[in-house]
Amino acid sequence: MKDRSLWFAIVIMLLFACRAFAANAPTVESFTPQGTAKSVHQVKARFSAPMVSFGDPRAAAPFDVDCAKGSGLWVDERDWVYDFERDLPGGVECRFTLKPGLKTLDGETVDGTRQFAFSTGGPAIIESRPGSGATISEDQVFVLALDAPATTDSIVQHAFCETPASSQRIGVRLITGEQRRAILDTQRYFLESYLRRTGGEHDNGSAASKKQMQALRDGAQSPIVVLQCRLRFPAEAAVRLVWERGVTSLSGVATVKDHVLSFKTRPAFRATFTCSRANKDAQCTPVLPMHLDFSAPVARAAAQQIRLEGSDGKTYSPKIADTKADYVSRVQFAGPFPEHASFKLVVPHDIEDDAGRMLANADSFPLTVRTDQDPPLAKFAADFGIIELKAGALLPVTLRNLEPEVKAGLHAVQPDAAKTDLQAPIPGRVLRADSTYAADIVSWLKRIREVQRNVWENVKGKGRVLKYRRGSRSVFGADNHPHRFDLPLADAGKAFEVVGIPLKNPGFYVVELASPKLGASLLGKRKPYYVQSAALVTNLSAHLKLGRESSLVWVTALDSGQPVADAAVDVLDCDGKSYWHGVTDADGIARIDHALPQTDALPACVEQYDRQYIVTARAGDDMTFVMSEWNEGIQPWRFNLPQGSYQGPTIATTVFDRSLLRAGE
C-alpha cells in the first residue's frame, strides 16, 4: 500500500514537471494579423525567446510563406516582419508555417502553434460613383470600385436595392459591353483615382497606364463593377444599395458582412417662380427681374419659348445666361415692369427635363403674377464717409416713394449737442480730438453697426427668436439730443432723387432718417424704419505709416494737397488711451520715434476682432482721423469695374544701369 502511494506521488510530480517544461518551451508569442483583415501591408511575429543574433542579415526566415510576394526581416532578436510589395487586395488567403526543427538562439526547439493564417476577406466596395449620401436619378447607374474582382453570379445573387416603401429586395443588373465602356469613358478621373489608390500606373500618358485603364474598362476580371437597380424609383425616395455578405472573389473568398450605400432620388421636375418683394405680403417689385427656376435642366431651345405676357398686351421674352450650354436651369425676365400690373407666365405644355420627365406642376401654368408699387427707398452710400469741407459739404442720400417730408435727426459729436444747428458755427473747442472724443467716434460707429443688424435671442420653449429686425431701432438714445430737420422731397416724395444734406461746419456727424412708409414696406408694421450714416466733415487728411521701430503721420489739406504744419496729432487706441502726442513739422510730418505696441494687444474697436489704432489730427477748428487698418487704395472692384486676368504671352525686358556685353561684342 505504501509502495503504491509512493509511485502515485512520483507520477504526479513527473506530470507537473512536464507541464512546467512545456510552459517554459519557446513559442510564437504573437502573430498579426489573423482572421480577416483589410489592406494588409505587413505581417509581424514575436517569439518568446531570442531567435537570432541582433543585426545578423544572414539569419534565415522562420516561416514558410504561402502568400503574395514580399520580403522578411528580423528587426531584433525576437521580432520578425514580412513586408508585402503593396497592400494586399481583397480575396487573398495567406498561411505562414513554422519551418520544421526551428530552434532558438540557445538551441531550443520552438513549440506551440505552428501555422498561422489570415484572409483579406471578400470583395469590398472601397469607392463608388455616386458616393453614399448623394442625390441620384430615378434610374441611376452605379459605378463601384472593389478591392478585388468578384464573380458575376455572386454579385447578382447578393447585391440588391431596397426602399422603405417596399419590403422586397430589388435585384440589380450588371451593365457590360459597349454600354459599360461608354459609361466608364466618362469616369476617367474615378479610374485614375482607383489606380492611384491601389498602387497602379495612373499617368494617363504612359503605355502601362493605358493598358491598366483598358483592363478596368473592358470588364474581364475587372474590380470595377457597373450596375443598375431593376426598378425605376419615384422622386424623393430613399434608396439603399446593399452589398450583402456572400459576394465572392475569383479566388473563392466571400464577404462576411453587409455594406450599405444610402441615397435619395432627386426631387420631381418642377418649375418655381420667384421675384423680389418688399415683404412677405407684397407683390413683385417692379424695378427688379423675375425668375423661373427648374429643379432639373431643360433644353435651351425649350426654355426660350417661355413667355411673360402683360395685361397691356406687351410680351416679355426670357433672358438666359450667356453660355453655350445646351441645358439651363433658370430663365429671367428683366424689369422694370409697370406698377400695379398683372402678368401671365406661359410655359410650353410639352417642356421636359434632361431625363425626359414632364413638369409635375404643369397645371400651375399659365401662372398669374402681379407687381406692386415701386418700393420706398432711403439709402446712404455707406455707413461712414469723409466729406470735403470746402467742396460743398453735402451728405448724399438716395430717396424714392417716401413721405413728402422725411423726419431726420442729426447729431454732431460734441458735449453740447443739444444746441447743434446745421447753419450755426460749431465751436472749435468742441472738435479738439482728445482721447474722449476719439473713443466717442468709435462708439458711434459701433452703435450704427449694431442697429443695422438683426438681433436674436434664445427664448425658453421657443428656441432662437428674432428680437429686433434691422432698421427697427434708432441709433439715438434718450440721453442724446440730435438736431431735427425735415427733408422736403420733389413730386410728393414719389420721385427717385438724390438729396444732399448740408453739413457746413467741420466735425463728425451722425445722421438718421425715419420713415413710417419705409417701415410699413420693410417691417410690415406702421412704425418708422431707421436709416443711419456717419460723416466726417473736414479739410484735413491724415496718412499713417506703421513701422516696427518707428512710425510716421503725414497731414495734408484736401482742397490743395499741401502739407499742414503745426497740426496736433494723437495716436490712440479705441478705448481712448494715448500712445503718442505731438505736432507736425513744416512738411506736415509727425515722426513717432519709438515702437508702438502690436495691434493684437489693443482693445477691440467696432468688431471683436477689429484691433487697431485711431490717429487724430487737428488744426484750428478742423479735425480728421484715420484708423490703422485703412491701408487699401482705390481698387476696381470697389467701383463695380471688371478685373480681367492676363494669360499671356508676356514680353519682358530688363533695364540695367550698364550694358551687358560679352567680350568681342
Image (cartoon, rainbow, N blue to C red):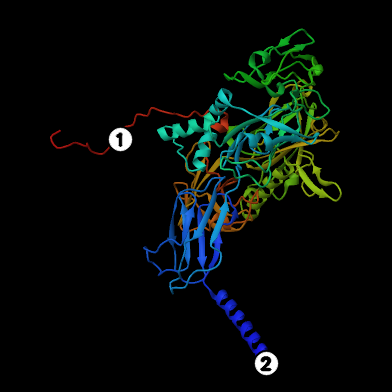
> Is residue 639 shown above or below 323?
below
Which quadrant of the view contains residue 435?
Answer: bottom right
Q: Residue at x 71, y 43 (%)?
A: 448
Which quadrant of the view contains residue 401?
Answer: top right
Rounded to the nearest angstrom, the CA distance separating label 2 from label 1 is 116 Å
Q: Residue furthest top?
A: 313
**Quarter of the image with the N terminus in it:** bottom right
Question: Which of the two residues, 268 or 419, is positioned nearer the viewer here?
Answer: 268
Which quadrant of the view contains residue 232?
Answer: top right
Disc 2: CA contacts within 10 A as few (<14), some (14-19) or many (>=20): few
> Is residue 3 shown above or below 101?
below
Considering only order in the chain, which callout, 1 or 2, is on the residue closer to the N terminus? 2
Callout 1 amino acid: Thr
Q: Residue furthest bottom?
A: 2
Residue 103 % position (x, y): 45, 69
Q: Can residue 44 be seen here? A: yes
Left or right: 535 as drawn, with respect to 90: right
Q: Which mark is residue 2?
A: 2
Left or right: 512 as drawn, with respect to 220: right
